[in-house]
Image (cartoon, helix red, strand yellow):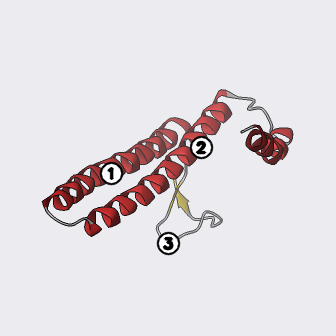
Amino acid sequence: MKRILVLVVVLLLPSFAFAAAPRTFSDLADLIVSLFDAGVGLLITAALVIYLFGISRSIFKAGEEGKEALRTYVLWGILTIFLMVSIWGILQLLQNTLFGGTTYAPGQSSGSQTYFQ
């Protein structure tokens, strides 16, 4: 356990050393929202992996017990993933509404100069 902690600290040390403290409230809020955004992305990925693993495990179970477990996994898995994606969308909506995010035209990359405000 101690080795893992040391490894994590050594790997994260450069990000802490080059980190700049937010100077305004908008910078701080943007940092917090981006951390939540990354966390929700990781949670969605983990949920999809667990969801697919549970479905594949339930498919190979034989009998009525396997069908009931599959039905439960599909229902709760879809609801959970929908909730996570909704949270992700709400965070983006709040960030764009409160802090003036830029909405790019469909088919345009963020490097393009054509955008809506």
Q: Is residue 18 above or below residue 54?
A: above
The image quadrant that residue 111 belongs to is bottom right
State the residue at coordinates (33%, 63%).
57
Tags 2 and 3 touching, CB below 8 Å = no
Residue that label 3 marks = 107
- Nearer mark to the viewer, of 3 and 1: 1
Viewer-closest of 14 and 51: 51
For mark 1, give the secondary structure: helix
**Residue on which disc 2 sits:** 34
- Using the image, determine if residue 11 lies above or below residue 48: above
Of tags 2 and 3, the one toward the viewer is 2
In the rendered image, residue 81, in percent from the top left (x then y), is placed at: 36, 52
Mark 1 is surrounded, within 10 Å at the Cα level, by few (under 14), some (14 to 19) or many (20 or more) other residues, namely few
Report the residue marked by disc 1: 82
Q: Could you tell me which quadrant the N terminus lies in?
A: top right
Q: Position of residue 99 (x, y in %)?
A: 55, 38
| Side of 80 where 101 appears, left or right | right
Q: CA distance from mark 3 to mark 1?
A: 25 Å
Q: Earlier in the sequence, mark 2 or mark 3?
A: 2
Please provide percent x and percent y for residue 21: 78, 32
**Residue that protrudes farthest toward the front in the picture:** 62
Disc 3 marks which amino acid?
Gly
Q: Earlier in the sequence, mark 1 or mark 2?
A: 2
